[in-house]
Image: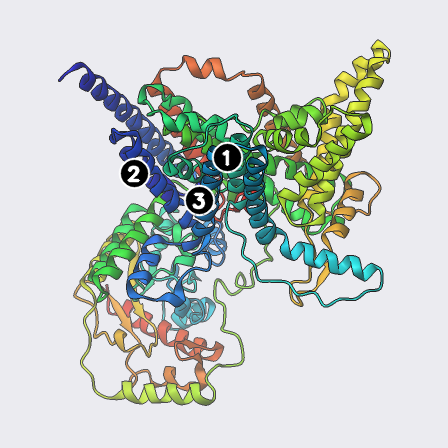
Amino acid sequence: MNRSETWWFSQAVRIFGNGCAFAAALTATAMVIGKGLPFPTIPDVSPKFRYFAEHKDRFDTIFVGSSRFRHQIIPQKFDAETRDHGTETSSFNLGASGMWPPETFFFLRQILRLHPARLKWVIFEIIDGKTRVDEGYASQQRVVYWHDWRHTLMAWEMVWESSRTPEEKRHLISLHTGIFFRQFFHLGRGTEWAQEKMNFVKKHRVPSWIEARGFEPEPEPSLLVGRVLAEYLSVIDELKKPRLPRGIRPGLIDALREIQAEVRGAGAEALFVLPPTINPHENFGGLPGGLPFILFNNLHDDALLYEPELHYDGGHLNARGAEAFTRRLGERFSEWRRQGR
Amino acid sequence: MLFVEFRFFEFFLIVFAVHWSLRGNTARKVWLLICGHFFYACFFIGDPLVFLRDLREGSWEKMPSGWWFPLVLWASTAMDYAVGRGLAVSRGERARKAWLVVSLAVNLGVLCYFKYFNFFVTSAGAFLGWFGLHTSVHTLQIILPYGVSFYTFQSMSYSIDVYRRRLDPLKSFLDLAFFISFFPPLVAGPIVRAITFLPQVFERRVWASVDVRACATLFFLGFLKKACVSEFAAQIADAFFASPTKYDHFSAVLGVVFYAVQIYCDFSGYTDMAIATSRLLGYELTPNFDFPYFAKSITDFWRRWHISLSTWLRDYLYIPLGGNRGSKLFTSRNLLLTMLLGGLWHGASWTFVIWGGMHGVALIFHREWGRMLAGAGEFFKTVMAWLAVPLTFYWICLTWIFFRAAPMIDGKAGVIKATSLEMAWTIFKAFAFFGKHGGKSFGWSCFAVFIVLAIVHWLNSRKFFTPIWQRLPDWVAAALLGVGTELAILFIPVKYKAFIYFQF
């Protein structure tokens, strides 16, 4: 190597070394800060999380899932039903609209980290995640907050196993990776803290779900009228026809097993529930051995839960429907308890 | 793409690596010219990959509305190149002047059309309306090309300096195109002067002259100012300027002061990043700010604020008008005219003209004040010396009210409830003690933040941190920059506000 090359080489080494020092310090600082950051402020999700964190030792049963839990399970009714069947429960509904895997798994893990002393049962919704993330939402905290490495890997797996085109898969994996970095480096978390401290954030009203322990009914009136109702009835007729059950994505099965193990590690038991659904892709027959489940996708066994009068829209029950579903869930939960784990 | 976006770092890494890998000066200029146009295009094509896909598929209806912006840039460059060649071959003064007039007419014509056409039309309509002559005003849907205010001024600096024989006309079109399209200052300054930049274009840049550590530090400080401090200050300023009468007087002061913080940190932060980026490529840009809020007078302020614009106006407008070579009235006229046009450069609105006018009046007053102070007693001089900085800052804040004021629009009906001027006057009254006040308050925590920022800024102006920083080994400095970057990322808001000076 001549002198000029030696000089260039030393420059390159110097830049590389300093670059590594920069990257190491950046990463280490992000990791240290991450350990101390509180749960982020996210509409719908953090108020429930914070309320539960303050009252975690009051409840022994929690429901974790999407709007199909949030609007359809009434904890007080569930407790009354289980009491009537000989099991005492004190439940809380942690369901949030739009909460699908991997977010549900992340959220439950945050709940378990609180070490709720009395937790006995975790009722977890069987639902597969949506692989798509609208670019406009990619920067929102609701999407960013659950993108730690573990759940970003889960998202990659979901995308990879999906039926999307290779170009779409590349784009989505790249999108999830970008969101992971936003989460890892805690983009904007300090601003969020400063905004709260300096009263730039509107003071939230006391949530209406506190008395109902997390349950929030769908609004009135129902959307199942006219053409929408006709379409719903047509779908119901179609679903009543005999059809072969579908298998569940292997990646989801693995994720359910992992979460079951973690729930058991926390001294509780997980029960996986599929609420009433007209989604033909959710025509599951059940879960593999070792994963306890209750399915409400049989239109013959649970015909009442598919009556239009009990529905807000095709995918969600109204307040009356929620009562019916909760009673039924309480009944089947108690039956599952009686049969032993 | 903004300097604070992650994709800019990806972009610049490639630009930097290829630039320093290329041996020849011409190759490097061509490379930076291509990169400059890509950088410029990203402002209006959105995602480049999506744009290329639409282009491949022939989806012309999806073409972005600003696709022709680079044509304006090239047309301006080509015209000034032709003017330069024309000046090179012209012998007589009349011919030379004619070439200069062509350059000024075309550049100013472009600027006037894109930026001021609708403003002139609506203002003329309003003016005639005062005399009872009601006219039907037709405005055009004109899109302002990004950076037009900056590159037309850069372009004019070339043709004017060639005319004045301070610069030799360029033979190479590439050199002129490179100078005008050089991407770090392209869309929001600093305004680069041909006489300072072109000598660098002729010489092959040498890596050994690049102080990477200083550049990285400068970029980081700019990033901190723009992405964190300015964005934070914007929340307070925006809240106040949207509903000024809802806040108490203390908060009115804070609202305006934080706007002063916002615009300084936004603009100087961007400039710092532009200068650092430029230096990393081996090119030196002149500093654009010198702690303007510590100015002791309005004259001093304009030596420290947007230096590239103020010196451009001084050299190409104020001095040609006659400068201070005539009577007091003549000098005052020149000062006022320069500042009025300087205000108008910022935007097509009477609030900007008023802003410029206020500065012009202050400059005139300061000239007289200097004469009056010379004859005053020592005690008075001492008191004024102590009050110089806060009084100057107070006046600057008053002028920012007009600069920032926007019309109040009823969101649902889309009706203008108060014009910019009316809003500016309302805020002016709220800030200067005698306006209507509400009960809302930003609280003492905002004031505490301001005090901390002011102390850090003052220490920085005294170069307090510089010796400490320079003593650290490179790897320690790099690690501290890593820590600082993560802390800065914590305080970046999720959605950025565009750089304020992009709109100019």
- Residue B352, label in figure: none
Judge from the rendering whether residue A159 lies leftward or rightward of residue B355; answer left or right. Answer: left
Q: Secondary structure at mark 1?
A: loop
Disc 3 target residue: B78
Looking at the image, tell me whether mark 1 or mark 3 is earlier in sequence order. Answer: 3
The one of B486 and B286 positioned closer to us in this rendering: B286
Looking at the image, tell me whether mark 2 or mark 1 is earlier in sequence order. Answer: 2
- Does the image show residue A304? yes
The one of B501 and B164 positioned closer to us in this rendering: B164
Vertical comparison of A50 with B355: above or below: below
Q: Do marks 1 and 3 both belong to one polypeptide chain? A: yes
Disc 1 target residue: B90
Residue at position x 63%, y 55% from top?
B117
Looking at the rendered image, the quarter that the N terminus of chain A falls into is top left
Q: Residues within 10 Å of mark 2 (few under 14, many from 20)?
A: few
Residue at position x 75%, y 37% from top?
B358
Q: CA distance from mark 3 to mark 2?
A: 28 Å
Vertical comparison of B327 with A254: above or below: above
